[in-house]
Amino acid sequence: MVVGIDPGHNGDNWDHTSYIDQSVWNGREEESCDTTGTQDANGYTEAQFAFNVAQNLAALLHAQGATVILTRTTNAGFGPCITERASIVNNAGAHVAVSIHADGGPVSGRGFSILEPVASGVNDAVIGASQVLGDHVRSAFLAATPMPVSDYYGVNGVVPRDDLGGLNLTTVPKVMVECGNMPNPTDAALLADPRFQQQAANAFAQAITTFLTGSTPGHAPTTTVTTT
C-alpha cells in the first residue's frame, strides 16, 4: 500500500512570504500557495509539530510494509505549494493520505478537528471514502491520545471544507487534521510534547491501517475499503 503524508507548512516559510503568498488555483478559487502556519505562545511552530508527527508516522508505516510518500522531507525549507502537495500524493498513486496540522483558534478553545473534502469535481470519487477515513481518525485520536474533540470548531470535531486546495484537488481518500489548538495553553503543552507527537502518529497509523485493511494492527481484517 502507498500512503501519502502531508506535514503542513514548512519551517522556512516565514522567510519566503513572496513565494508562499503567490496565488494558485485550489479547484474552486484562487488561494495562497501556502501559509506560515501558527505557533504557540512560546514560539513552537505548527510546521515543526507537523513534521515531527509525520516522521513518527512514516516510521510506523514503513515498519508495517507501506510505501510512504512525504510532501516534504525537511523542516528547514519552504513550500511546496498546496497544489504541488496534492500532485505529489496523487501522482504517486497513494491509496490514502493525511495532512497534519495544528489550529490557530481561540485561546479558550480546545481539541482536535478533522477537515473533510466537499465534492468539487476533481475529488468527487473519493468523498465517501474520505469521510470513512475521517471516522477512523476521530476514533483513533480519542482512543490513543489525551486530546479531546474540538469544542469550538465543527460538529463533533468534523468540518466539511470546500475552500482548501489540498482537499479540493485530491484524487485519493484524504483528510486534514488539526491535531489541537496551539493558542490554548493546555493543547499547546501537549502539541509540543514528543510523547503526544508519538501518540498522534500512533493514532494516524491505526486509522490508516483500519481504513486500508479493515483491522487494527495485530488483528485479523474483517473488511477492505476499496476506492477507484
Image (cartoon, grey):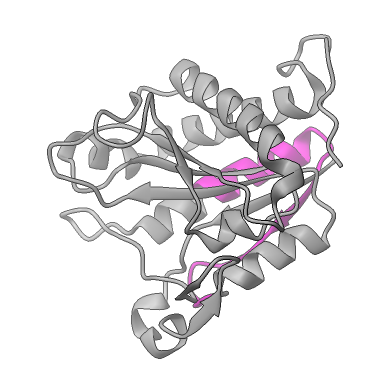
Image quarter hosting the C terminus: top right
Q: Is residue 162 magenta?
A: no
- The magenta stretch is 53-79
Is 68 or 26 nearer to us in this picture? 26
Occupied quadrant, residue 186: top left
Measured along the vertical axis of the image, is residue 38 above or below residue 201?
below
Residue 6 point in image, percent of width and height: 59, 55
Q: Is residue 19 left or right of residue 223?
A: left
| Count of numbered tags | 0
**Residue 97, position in %: x, y?**
67, 46
Left-right relation of 117 to 115? right
Using the image as rendered, state which of residue 4 and residue 188 is in the foreground.
4
Q: Quadrant of the N terminus?
A: top right
Residue 82: name its quadrant: bottom right
Give the residue at x 51% y 71%. Answer: 29
Name the residue furthest bottom. Answer: 18
